[in-house]
Amino acid sequence: MAERRPRGEEASEKAAPVIVRRSKKGDGHGGHHGGAWKIAYADFVTAMMAFFLLMWLLGSTSKYDKQGIEDYFNTPLSSLLGGNEGTAAARPNVIQGGGRDMSDTRPGDGKKAQQEPAKPTLTQATMAPNDTARLEQLKAKLSALIEQTPALKAFKDQIRISITNEGLRIEIVDSLKRPMFATGSAKLQSYAVEILTQIGASLNDVDNRISIAGHTDAVTYANGPAGYSNWELSSERANAARRALVAGGMREDKLLQVRGLADVLPLNANVADEPTNRRISVLVLNKAAEQAFFRDGGRTSIDEALPASEAIPGVVSKLKVSTRSAY
């Protein structure tokens, strides 16, 4: 005989819901494969590529081109829109792009504005005269300094100052009785140090850059280690002069070039051991010579030869082949 259950218990069993549990098959990592991280990574790679491209462009751009770019962005916007003397086409330092300069055409000007050449800017028209005037003033100041300073006046016959196509050239030449350096040495005599230190501070009066060159006579250098020649000697003498000028107050950031020229630019080519051929040449560059130097990455030779009326035939071509620089 079957067991009888209480009526309430039998009713509760029929009312209980059926629960089915299903386990999800897979590797358990489905929630970690969204695409958002790929977008972020692509942005990062693009930014890094742009950064290194910028670094490469900065490293491969000459100082002259960088100055032109800087001048372009420093120009007020109004001058660009006005189409007057301040337009990009009229400024020599701005790197010109292709096509026509839209800033040169005003509404209603038509073809006339396109055909008329750009007027020279005030800077173009006055830069060369102003530059020359500054160098002339510096020359006058140095000449007065030599006359007023006993330490310099005693050696005024050995200090030569002249204006050349490249700027203001100051040369301190040897004398038979008073050489600037001992024979075969790069050590300045005490009076030569005094001359250079007195001149040094005056060179800060202009913002022009400085080139220093050492020259020797044509006598073969016999003393010293093997391979040591007038090239090394003239380079070391130029650097000795640089140190004396800086000690006298010349700003070191004004220096553009320090080099040794051995005997390739003699003042007197007929006498091998002519004392005046042994000299230090300090050239205060005008802006045209400075820009030419930067324009081709320093390959332009800063000519420190004699003025055209005194130039020695064949010297320039020899200089281009033989010059060595010392930095």
Image (cartoon, rainbow, N blue to C red):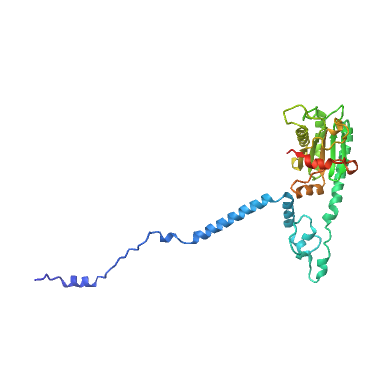
Q: Is residue 314 above or below residue 128?
A: above
The answer to which image quadrant residue 141 occupies is: top right
Q: Residue furthest right?
A: 309
Q: Residue furthest left?
A: 1
Pick the quarter of the image with the C terminus. top right
* 293 sits left or right of 143 in the view: left
Q: How many marks?
A: 0
Residue 180: x, y in percent?
Answer: 82, 30
Which residue is drawn at the image coordinates 37% and 61% (left, top)?
26
Pick the quarter of the image with the N terminus. bottom left
The answer to which image quadrant residue 144 occupies is: top right
Q: Is residue 227 above or below residue 39?
A: above
Which residue is drawn at the image coordinates 24% and 72% (left, top)?
15
Viewer-nearest residue: 14 or 20: 20
Viewer-nearest residue: 173 or 85: 173
Residue 161: x, y in percent?
Answer: 87, 39
Viewer-nearest residue: 79 or 6: 79
Residue 177: x, y in percent?
Answer: 87, 26
Q: Is residue 92 visible?
A: yes
Q: Is residue 109 visible?
A: no
Residue 272: x, y in percent?
Answer: 85, 31
Q: Is residue 35 above or below residue 56?
A: below
The answer to which image quadrant residue 98 occupies is: bottom right
